[in-house]
């Protein structure tokens, strides 16, 4: 059974061009240019739609679906989430990770549990791991590779380097 991963959300339409404007949730939008179809969520059910064209205008990504061009047809997509199957995702370099792979990882400094990754927040400087501690508090860690000894999404475990400075306030 294939898993689905959120990559974008439709934020508006361009009726003149028949395009859907996307808000991306991926660092790898180039996959849109190489896939034949997307899956759109309609009330919990994923429906397949074939791609006619993908455009990049400035920082925006726009997608044209086959057989959809009228305003009434396009307006049903506004606010809908777009998914790809895991088998359609691009393989990543060794030091890159999909956010969905990091969610649920338990984070440790030496043998001390810091928390579980609930989300990864994107900032201009670097990504931030949002952890939930044992006492249900939120803790934010900069996701800078030099601060981590081991990142193993397969085992759902992350080890922070003891000398990173992150563990100093944990006593």
Image: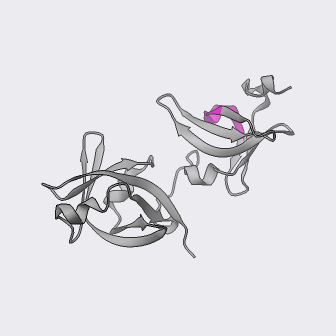
- Residue at horizontal 79%, vertical 23%? 169
Relative to residue 168, is residue 42 drawn left or right? left
Image location (x, y in percent) of residue 46: 44, 70
Residue farthest along the bottom direction in this orientation: 1
Is 24 rendered above or below residue 108? Answer: below
Viewer-proximal residue among 83 and 11? 11
Residue 170 at x, y = what percent? 82, 27
Q: Examine the structure image and report whether residue 147 is included in the region drawn in magenta.
A: yes
Q: Quadrant of residue 57?
A: top left
**Rendered view: 127 above or below 163:** below
Q: Percent position (x, y) of residue 41?
A: 43, 65
- Where's residue 95, x and y in %? 58, 45
20 left or right of 168?
left
The residues colored magenta run 141-149
In the image, residue 126 lies in the stretch drawn in magenta: no
- Outermost residue toward the left? 16
At 26% from the left and 59% from the top, the residue drawn is 75
Quick one: quadrant of the N terminus?
A: bottom right
């Amino acid at each position: 059974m294939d898993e689905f991963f959120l990559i974008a959300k439709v934020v508006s339409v361009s009726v003149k061009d028949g395009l859907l404007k996307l808000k991306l949730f991926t660092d790898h939008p180039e996959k849109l240019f190489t896939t034949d179809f997307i899956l759109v969520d309609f009330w919990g059910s994923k429906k397949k739609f074939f791609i006619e064209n993908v455009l990049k205008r400035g920082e925006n990504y726009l997608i044209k679906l086959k057989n959809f061009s009228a305003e009434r047809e396009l307006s049903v997509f506004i606010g809908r989430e777009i998914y790809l199957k895991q088998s359609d995702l691009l393989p990543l370099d060794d030091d890159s990770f999909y956010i969905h792979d990091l969610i649920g990882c338990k984070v440790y400094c030496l043998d001390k549990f810091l928390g579980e990754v609930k989300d990864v927040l994107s900032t201009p400087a670097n990504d931030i791991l949002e952890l939930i501690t044992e006492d249900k508090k939120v803790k934010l860690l900069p996701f800078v590779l030099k601060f981590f000894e081991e990142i193993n999404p397969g085992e759902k475990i992350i080890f922070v380097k003891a000398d990173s400075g992150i563990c100093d306030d944990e006593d």
